[in-house]
Image: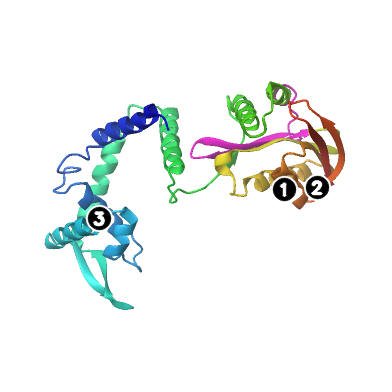
């Protein structure tokens, strides 16, 4: 890892801690600093039927247990929290908020929302989306398992087809060593889709998570009876979510509703996961031709199925 990358990370940390004021002794105009505020938040948002114990908080927050014990004792003296034996395990002390603690947690949440609202106010809607997407990317890359994996499917918006061309060219170059002729092919397909679009017979789905495109697929008309599935793409960050299957199933459903009786696609034998998906959804291999159009030698394959 290069020193500039480490320094960039440290610089971001310094900026962020300054931005949200975590170095102040009192956070959000409260009597408490960050450790106390975060502990109150965790207790307030724990399941009502399963309040946490100190050990749970220490693990969740990766907090030194001695330091946490002092924080909890201070909050208990202030009347913010109470400890009571777990009915199922008397040695386990469950932590809950008192009425005073609930009031404090509510005021802290409101103050935090107001502070964040003030930070976001100068940004336009697109900039806010970009910011929150970048935050989600940081969390995901650094291993945050609490992120929701909700992916929405939507119609393409201006700029999306150019992004798809860029993303696919980059992905297949990195993973398979394909050359710029593949990028040219994707560009022609997306341009043809835009220029010759047939309403009711053709469609594109964009898969989006946290404001970022993580997949796409197209259905176009091959002939009156046959639909053609094109450019199935799932970003590496969204693999394992069943997104590829979801996109292909959308294509099958649309093709049936549009009146097609058969669906056709072209792929390459090196795309093992995609071929397995197509086969599991009832597609059959109907043709295979060797080529090196994109650089490395491979076999182009046609797959088809009835609808």
Q: Nearer the viewer, mark 3 or mark 1?
A: 3
Mark 3–mark 1 distance (CA, rounded to whole Å): 47 Å
Q: Which mark is residue 110?
A: none
Q: Using the rendered view, name the quadrant where residue 44 is placed.
A: bottom left
Check the image and report above or below for 32 versus 191.
below
Residue named by callout 2: 283
Q: Using the rendered view, name the quadrant where residue 230 is placed.
A: top right
Residue named by callout 1: 277
Position of the N terminus, as image quadrant, is top left
The residue sitting at 78% across, 27% down in the picture is 292
* Image location of residue 304, percent across then percent down: 83, 43
The residue sitting at 22% across, 57% down in the picture is 68
The residue segment tinted magenta is: 193-220
Mark 2–mark 1 distance (CA, rounded to whole Å): 9 Å
Q: Residue furthest left?
A: 77
Q: Secondary structure at mark 2?
A: loop
Q: Secondary structure at mark 1?
A: helix
The mark that comes first in sequence, 2 or 3, is: 3
Residue named by callout 3: 64
Confirm or deny contact between disc 2 and disc 1 (CB under 8 A): no
The residue sitting at 29% across, 42% down in the picture is 113
How crowded is the residue under tag 2: few (<14 C-alpha within 10 Å), some, or many (20+)?
Answer: some
């Amino acid at each position: 890892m290069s020193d500039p990358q480490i320094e960039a990370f440290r610089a971001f940390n310094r900026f962020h801690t300054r931005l949200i004021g975590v170095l102040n002794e009192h956070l959000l105009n409260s009597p408490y600093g960050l450790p106390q505020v975060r502990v109150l938040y965790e207790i307030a948002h724990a399941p009502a039927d399963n309040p946490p114990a100190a050990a749970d908080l220490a693990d969740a927050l990766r907090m030194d247990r001695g330091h946490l014990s002092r924080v909890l004792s201070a909050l208990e003296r202030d009347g913010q929290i109470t400890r009571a034996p777990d009915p199922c395990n008397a040695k386990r002390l469950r932590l809950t908020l008192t009425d005073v603690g609930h009031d404090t947690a509510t005021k802290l949440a409101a103050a935090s929302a107001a502070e964040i609202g003030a930070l976001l106010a100068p940004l336009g809607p697109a900039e806010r989306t970009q910011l929150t997407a970048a935050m989600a990317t940081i969390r995901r890359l650094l291993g945050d398992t609490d992120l929701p994996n909700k992916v929405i499917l939507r119609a393409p918006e201006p700029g999306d087809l150019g992004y798809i061309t860029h993303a696919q060219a980059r992905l297949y170059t990195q993973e398979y060593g394909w050359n710029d002729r593949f990028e040219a092919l994707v560009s022609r397909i997306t341009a043809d889709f835009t220029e010759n679009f047939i309403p009711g017979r053709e469609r594109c789905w964009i898969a989006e998570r946290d404001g970022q495109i993580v997949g796409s697929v197209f259905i176009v008309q091959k002939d009156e009876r046959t639909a053609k599935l094109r450019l199935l793409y799932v970003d590496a960050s969204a693999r394992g979510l069943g997104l590829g299957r979801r996109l292909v199933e959308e294509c099958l459903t649309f093709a049936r509703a549009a009146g097609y009786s058969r669906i056709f696609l072209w792929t390459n034998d090196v795309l093992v996961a995609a071929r397995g998906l197509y086969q599991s959804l009832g597609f059959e291999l109907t043709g295979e031709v060797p080529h090196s159009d994109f650089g490395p030698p491979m076999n182009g394959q046609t797959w088809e199925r009835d609808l």
